Amino acid sequence: MKWTELCIYTTNEAIEPISNIIHEAGASGVVIEDRQDLEKERESIYGEIYDLNPDDYPEEGVRLKAYLPVNSFLGETVTEIKQAINNLLLYDIDIGLNKITLSEVNEEEWATAWKKYYKPAKISERITITPTWEDYQPVSTDELIIELDPGMAFGTGTHPTTVLSIQALERFIEKDDTVLDVGCGSGVLSVASVLLGAEQVFAYDLDEVAIQSTKLNVKVNKVDGKVKVKQNNLLDHIDETADIIVSNILAEIILRFEKDAFERLKPGGVFITSGIIQKKKRDVKDGLEKAGFDILEINQMEDWISIIAQKPEESR
Ligand SMILES: C[S@@+](CC[C@H](N)C(=O)[O-])C[C@H]1O[C@@H](n2cnc3c(N)ncnc32)[C@H](O)[C@@H]1O
């Protein structure tokens, strides 16, 4: 089959909304080439070291590559993508250069294009994420290892929004907790929750590709007995109660279910939100407080914010 490679030149802030647009348009897989990845300190506090080739990155900003099958709808799909990206300006999202180019590639090229960027990474005190195809040897005996094949779903585990979520899970999960993972993507947060002690996890995503990817990754990590995966819109019609709800999703989407999250949490339960850009921090925080939450922490990594909120004990 022939594929078209769509290259979008944009900003770091627009990566997530544009990735969503691309997925919704039916593209399978997004490659993110962010100049900042080259320029930032490569050795993190956890000591992982990446090997990046500057030739793979744009001269400035971010280049997103997506792959669309060449068919009779291609022209319309590209027009819809362009329109949806322009609409991001209405949400005050900086779309930068917003240059879009198209070129034809063959199947093998795109199927493996993103894999070269994905290496084992220690992303919190206890958790290391490694692609399923790497032969990773643990450095210490208490290291928890997540093997991940994100396939076409969001979530290699190394995106700052995911790292913030995992670091929060590591601090707040207690043994035998029940966790709801809303917008599970590759399932990385569900797997992390079980490894950190959760007794059961309910993983939800709207996207069928994400559901399949989560099912695969919970199996690969041998936690499928503890993770129930379901295609669902946020927490609509969900009646499980949880100690922790984690959701790494856009601010606009978090705002839609803050009340439902409050209802589904046990008193004292914790809502870990991530995927929030700076400009939306206040909206999400205000919404959480309005829903009845106390704000425990606001954390930041690069341009991304994670807000951790607690349902008060006395709301029992
Ligand atoms: C940024 S990804 C996070 C993936 C993963 N949890 C992680 O941290 O790497 C957000 C996920 O939310 C899902 N999503 C978006 N809108 C949703 C909705 N209304 N209900 C459920 N899932 C949704 C997307 O399909 C995507 O998989």
Image: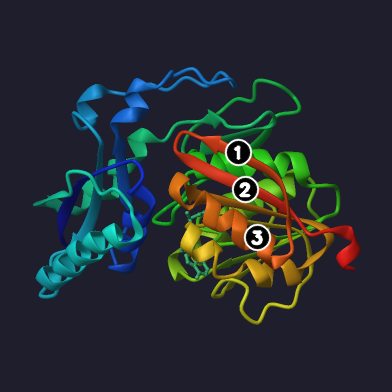
Which quadrant of the rendered structure holds the N terminus?
A: bottom left
Q: Residues within 10 Å of mark 1 (few under 14, many from 20)?
A: few
Residues at marks 2 and 3 touching, judged by CB atoms closer than 8 Å: yes
Residues at marks 2 and 1 touching, judged by CB atoms closer than 8 Å: yes
Q: Earlier in the sequence, mark 2 or mark 3?
A: 3
Residue named by callout 2: 307
289 versus 196 height, above or below: below
Q: Place residue 117 in its image quadrant.
A: top left
Give how far across and how far down residue 186 sits, in percent: 51, 54
Looking at the rendered structure, the secondary structure element under dot 2 is strand
Residue named by callout 3: 288
Q: CA distance from mark 1 to mark 3?
A: 15 Å
Residue that appears at 25% across and 53% down: 66
Residue named by callout 1: 299
Q: CA distance from mark 2 to mark 3?
A: 9 Å
Q: CA distance from mark 2 to mark 1?
A: 6 Å
Q: Is residue 29 left or right of residue 75?
A: right
Q: Residues within 10 Å of mark 3 (few under 14, many from 20)?
A: many
